[in-house]
Image (cartoon, coloured by chain):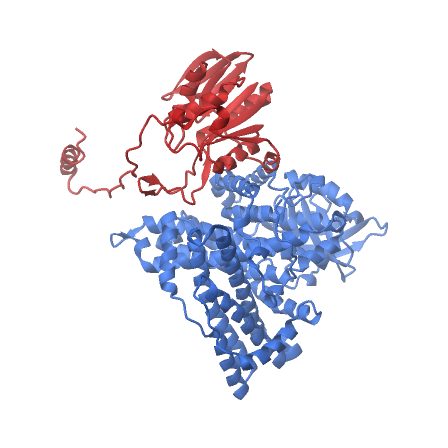
Chain colours: A red, B blue
Amino acid sequence: MNIFVLMKSTFDTEEKINVRNNKIDEDGAEFIINPYDEYAIEEAIQQRDQHGGEITVVNVGSSDNEKQLRTALAMGADKAVLINTEDDVEAGDAFTTVKILEAFFEEKDVDLILAGNVAIDEATGQVGPRLAQCLDIDYVTTITELRIDGKQVTVEKDVEGDIEVIETSLPVLVTCQQGLNEPRYPSLPGIMKAKKKPLEELEIDDLNIEEEDVQPMTKTIEIFLPPERQAGKVLQGESQEQVAELVQLLQKEAKVF
Amino acid sequence: MSDIQEKVFKGGSFITEDVLPEDIITPEDLTDEHEMIAKTTEDFVEGEVLPKMDQLENQQFDYAVDLLKQAGELGLLGVDVPEEYGGLGLDKISSALIAEKFALAGGFSVSYGGHVGIGSLPIVFFGNQQQKQKYLPPLATGEKLAAYALTEPGSGSDALGAKTSAKLNEAGTHYILNGEKQWITNSAFADVFIVYAQIDGDKFTAFIVERDFPGVSTGPEEKKMGLKSSSTRTLILEDTEVPVENVLGEVGRGHIIAFNILNVGRYKLAIGGVGASKRGIELSASYANERKQFNTPIANFSLIQEKLATMATHTYANESAVYRTVGLFEQRMGKLTQEQLNDGSEVAKAIAEYQIECSITKVFGSELMDYVVDEAVQIHGGYGFMQEYEVERMYRDSRVQRIFEGTNEINRLLIPGSLMKKAMKGELPLLQKAQNLQEELMMLMPEEVGTKTLEQEKYLLKNAKKIGLLAAGLAAQKYGEKLKQEQELLANIADIVSEIYNIESAILRTEKAIAKTGEAKNQQKILYTEVYVEEAFNRIEADAKETIIASESGDTLRITLSAMRKLTRHDPTNVIAKKREIAKTILQEEKYTV
């Protein structure tokens, strides 16, 4: 089975976010594999171990992302591809990424593509479904279970807490939701093996596309942090007075009704 | 795994030689694999160990065993075990990084260290082929767990005074061991113990003792101040029959194993101190940002900032010294051939070479950690005294670090002692240097010090080395052989030597980083170095002065002190201002950052 995983590098979840000049300051920040993409990598490994085949992890980004690709290899993926856009693409969005990936997959023989449900940074959740559309294959988002039997695919999909069972067939693209599996830690032997696994680096030239083809379709107007939480208020007096005051505050200050 | 410096340095040579930035290993030299190994360990500790902390602290040791086995599956127990015996045979930097990350887990990290370090390493370094084949593969996976049994009720620092006896049976097949080993880490569940006993009353020897051997038992669990997650019991040996093939190393040469394993244990302990200190800073910085008094986060008070800055500055110096020491080991051990690695005496020589550096990092690592956790509790105020806050446990866990692996007092005495030995053997040109210095001091003219980054710090380092030689030289001259009895002076000399090592390590690390990525990206490192050097230099001056006053009198004393003043004269750094800058970054990032 030819398995591909779409992987994004994101800020470490423990990283403090500082905004400078309408940009998130990345200086000295730690990057990790987008946590939802870890479910995708883990699932790819389990499916490969069950059905055989090869896993290629694909990243559109910069040379800094090599580290996260190596981590995916250390977890157990077989090959990695870095499509390095740092010199060619100044600004990008989900459209940009999908265009590049579409070109990448043009010549590829694909059985299964896995991606995270969303990336924890911009959280558009669009790259997976849009890519499937472009490649003209089926897709299911937010999956929590994946069973493959020959060409037959059964998927459990998380629908706002309920489960939908969907049947489809290979080739298929799925995006992975929390609960699908428990991603493994890259073991030390895995880390040492990863050093020797192939990591191919491409630029958009190699995919026969130009910067004009991948111009973002969205514009970022402003980036700001959520407002700081205000200190709570403790109401005084008899319960009845407190309730009356609370109703009034909800109405006038919080404007909830 | 890593391409590190080509030169092999003699232990203690930093006192007499100038060292270049490219000669040392720093935390900025890590490879991607190193970082991935560190991350796997950190994720494992945070994801698997910390959630079980309550059970571990409650001494439910089945949790500890289970977690050690999980660590084994990830390869975390086989780092120092050669590949041919089922391990990974990675470099010393990898095992150092792992030890640093495990430190977050307090007492559990001691269980881990007890197994992979003092428990397994004696066999890795000193076992014969059969012993390695039999014991190492299950130790590397965690199928079997190890412990180290040296201390006895009557012999702590005086380890060779052990009373446990071993006597060959009549058939010549087994040694019969009798005695009690005290405070044995992992004793509740270890399968293999490294035990030291006296054969025929005077041949101190190491043995591999299996739990299942007849006559092996353990006493009740000790009630300790801290490190409660680790098991500590007495190992009781009653007519225990140990096959002769389980003698580790040579009969009567157990001290070679004991002391060298302690050396490794010492720098590993220092690494743990770095890890714990980083955690203490992280917890304190985020607490200071959160906690409000007088309507403002306490992080806004400059006394709190001063604490955080000092904690971070010390951590930086210590981290620099520790990783430099790890680099020395890696360099030296990495150069050994397979044949030499199989020969315990070659390994012992390589380890013993850096005894001074090991003692320095042990003393400072443990005192740094104690200082940081103490201030961490202080920043937490009354909440820090409550068990629901992690710093409360860290405070208790820290205290014993100054006691085990050789008390800090013993380690302080070892530092000048080893230096003297090296000088006498002609391995270090200490005496020559001390003589030259006396002549030099007579004619010493004040030097123009440049104002470029770190120029003053390098000047102070150069002078600190001279001050150290001066003080040590005078004490040696005055007391000669009797200096051994002047323990206060020896401790002063040890502190001066240690501070020299620390400030040199910090300066070289910062210089190396600047050469790589420029000054702008290394502002925090520069600040740490400037503050640490200024404060450490003042401590060196005080220690030297006290030593000289105790060694000289009258006119000679006055002349010597005035000569020293020429060496200590410098434009002082405004540490208060610099510490506020340091704290600003720490509070913004809410963690120790370089």
Side of A122 where B180 appears, left or right: right
Q: Please, is residue B411 above or below residue B569 in the view?
A: above
Return the residue found at the far right: B171
Give how far across and how far down residue B472 sits, in percent: 59, 74
Residue B413: x percent and y percent? 60, 68
**Can residue B181 be spotted in the picture?**
no
Query: Which residue shows up at 26% across the image and 39% down it?
Result: A227
Q: Position of residue B227 (x, y in %)?
A: 52, 51
Of residues A93 and B304, which is closer to you in this image? A93
Please, is residue B109 above or below residue B562 in the view?
above
- Is residue A59 visible from the viewing direction of this image? yes
Q: Can you name the residue that lies furthest to the bottom here?
A: B555
Residue B586 lies, with reference to residue A218, above or below; the image says below
Q: Is residue B384 above or below residue A216?
A: below
Q: Nearer the viewer, residue B185 or B180?
A: B185
Look at the image and tell me in which quarter the N terminus of chain A lies: top right
At x 86%, y 49%, the residue is B171
Residue B6: quadrant of the picture: bottom right
Seen from the viewer's position, the closer of residues A148 and A172 is A172
